[in-house]
Amino acid sequence: MPAKPLIDKVALIGVGFIGGSIGLALRKRQLAERVIGIDPNPHNLQIARKRKAIFSGTRDLQRGIQNVSLAVISAPVQEIPQLIAQVAEATGGDCLITDTGSVKEQIVAQVKRGTRYIGSHPMAGSEQQGPRAAHADLLEDRMVILTPSGKIASNDLKQLKQFWGGLGAHTVQMSPLKHDRIVASVSHMPHLAAAGLVAATPRQDIPHVASGWLDTTRIASSDADLWVDILCNNRDHVLKSAQRFGKVWALLCEALQQNDRKALKKILRDANAQREIAEKAWK
């Protein structure tokens, strides 16, 4: 824990699950003098204040963003570019801006040149929603992908790395393009597959599901509006990932059709090996 707070004043624009968790982590680790919550939903602000994820809250961005050193935007992807522009204008460039959106190319394309913005994507989340479900250890030992683009100040990048590191996460850097391609495979496509599995399960069979079905489809419980936004904004990369999945799916179905145990076993064993690699990387 630092001898003094890392940041004087942080604004959390959006205090739902992610924003609320960041606020709780800031408080637990005493990393900020003040944490201001900005959210159009008064219920979210009320819960966030009650849980002490924020010191104070407001629905007025212009009012809440004054004298802020860092603004973290946790909002639907479609809304992020406009919020970045509003924060930049209201603070006159005195505030470093980041976001937690899971799509970056379309955001970066709309950010005005010279804006103090560096994209962030915490690779942590839940199908749960709202600040009531937030928890202070969400980012502990998790990865945050930073997507600097254009001309950025080295001190701004350093500050952002320190910010996420202070919350217990480790950071990696990549381009917005590479980010969107990777998350299409490891985040967006899994959601699409989980939703498809649920939709393909006959309603009369649902009362008989077991833990395997529930574990596999957990993320299908996520907010539909949020995920439509994400999937459509990363459509090209998600479609390519879906095509790769389709090819493997076709091989599985063909092996079953031909009663080819050898081919089926190879695909299952390869999947098992990939899963073990992912488990080790996660830990």
Image (cartoon, rainbow, N blue to C red):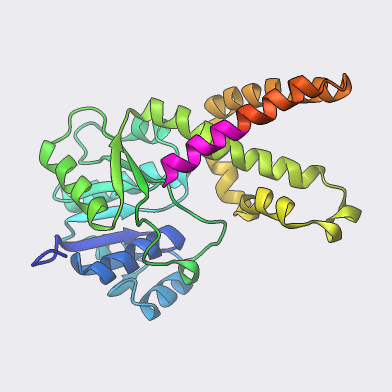
Q: Is residue 211 magenta?
A: no
Q: Percent x, y for residue 156?
A: 15, 43
Location of residue 85 in the rendering, given as x and y in whole percent from the top left corner = 30, 44
Q: Determine if the magenta segment contains residue 282.
A: yes
Q: Nearer the viewer, residue 1 or 185?
A: 1
Q: Horizontal placement of 206 versus 65: left or right?
A: right
Residues drawn in magenta: 272-283
Give the residue at x 23% y 27%.
150
Identify the image quadrant of the N terminus: bottom left
Q: Residue at x 31, y 65 (%)?
A: 25
Is 138 rendered above or below residue 282?
A: below
Q: Is residue 56 left or right of residue 252?
A: left
Q: Main secondary structure of the magenta part?
A: helix
Residue in view at x 65 percent, y 55 percent: 221
Indicate the position of residue 252 as horizontal and vertical percent values. 76, 25
Closest to the observer, 147 or 173: 173
**Left or right: 30, with 132 as reference point:** left
